[in-house]
Image: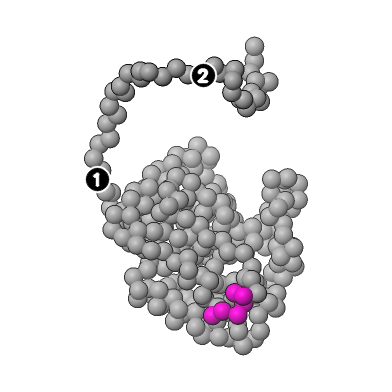
């Protein structure tokens, strides 16, 4: 497969991030509510795409929810309860980096839920999502699809990259052994939850750069945003600073110049 050149990719990402800021301002202005679900196999590239979406946006308007394993108290609650608390209010975009679909994937494959809990999830999830949509929340669901060979290549790369070894959790290592089980769980989940009101959109993520561009372009196409006209910002001349004498710089403790060794004399 031909891959996009880095220069072209960087240019397109920069353009898309400008559009995302426009989207953000429209959401804030109109009170629109957006919930975006990111699911997929481990090492499928969800995190990198989320990072490109959010890095230029205001975290007060667009924020990421990545919940840890439920507490003992949360295990006794209605399954969707802890996710409901994070749904968007007016003028907000919430990105779920994994979501209530943990029950249909990880919990099902790893045996963390009972058969009855799993069946109830499959029954109630479409109704739960229809309720969200009827309430005015725009729900968008992405599944990042990565091939067996590419996932294995990424796992192997993490072994030698000190900045990525933290991503190899015991759960990730176990999931690596259960490719077929996760495939079956995904197929069953799609069969029950790929509904008209909240369809799944599959992102081919074997090439990370392509996946990011495709996903962001698609996301922008789903939301009917318009550019919000803002008054031009003018920086007035700063008034003269009078009556202030700066303390001696020697009285302050500065961070050492770590960069100095890289400067050629």
Residue 181 image offset from top left, x and y in percent: 68, 75
Seen as rendered, the residue at the extreme bottom is: 116
Q: Is residue 77 magenta?
A: yes
Tag 1 residue: 229
Element assignment for label 1: loop
Q: Quadrant of residue 11?
A: top left
Residue in the image at 67% along x and 58% along y = 151
The relative height of residue 51 versus residue 189 in the rendered view (above or below) is above
Query: Which residue is painted at 56% across and 51% down in the image?
Result: 48
Within 10 Å of disc 1 (Cα), the crowding (few <14, some 14-19, many 20+) is few
Q: Residue 159 vs residue 58: left or right? A: right
Residue 237 can be seen in this image: yes
Left or right: 233 as drawn, with respect to 179: left
Cα distance between the residues tagged 1 and 2 = 44 Å
Q: Say whether residue 11 is left or right of residue 180.
A: left
| Residue at the (28%, 49%) spot, across then down | 227
Residue 256 rendering spot, x and y as whole percentages: 65, 25
User: What residue range appears in magenta?
Assistant: 73-78
The residue furthest top is 265
Residue 31: image location, x then y, percent: 31, 60
Q: Quadrant of residue 44?
A: bottom right
On residue 247, which mark appears?
Answer: 2
């Amino acid at each position: 497969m031909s891959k996009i050149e880095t220069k072209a990719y960087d240019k397109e990402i920069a353009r898309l991030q400008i559009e995302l800021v426009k989207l953000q301002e429209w959401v804030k202005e109109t009170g629109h509510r957006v919930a975006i679900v990111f699911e997929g196999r481990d090492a499928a590239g969800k995190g990198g795409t989320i990072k490109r979406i959010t890095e230029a946006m205001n975290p007060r308007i667009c924020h990421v929810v990545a919940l840890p394993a439920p507490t003992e108290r949360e295990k006794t609650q209605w399954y969707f309860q802890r996710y409901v608390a994070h749904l968007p209010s007016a003028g907000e975009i919430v990105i779920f980096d994994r979501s209530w679909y943990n029950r249909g994937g990880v919990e099902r494959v790893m045996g963390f839920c009972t058969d009855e809990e799993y069946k109830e999830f499959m029954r109630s999830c479409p109704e739960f999502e229809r309720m969200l949509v009827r309430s005015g929340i725009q729900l968008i669901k992405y599944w990042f699809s990565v091939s067996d060979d590419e996932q294995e290549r990424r796992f192997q790369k993490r072994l030698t990259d000190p900045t990525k070894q933290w991503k190899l959790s015991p759960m990730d290592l176990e999931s690596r052994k259960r490719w077929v089980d996760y495939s079956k769980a995904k197929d069953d989940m799609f069969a029950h939850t790929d509904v008209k009101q909240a369809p799944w959109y599959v992102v081919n993520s074997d090439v990370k750069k392509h996946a990011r561009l495709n996903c962001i372009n698609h996301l922008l196409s789903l939301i009917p945003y318009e550019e919000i006209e803002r008054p031009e910002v003018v920086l007035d001349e700063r008034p003269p600073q009078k009556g202030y004498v700066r303390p001696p710089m020697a009285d302050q403790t500065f961070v050492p110049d770590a960069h100095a060794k890289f400067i050629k004399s």
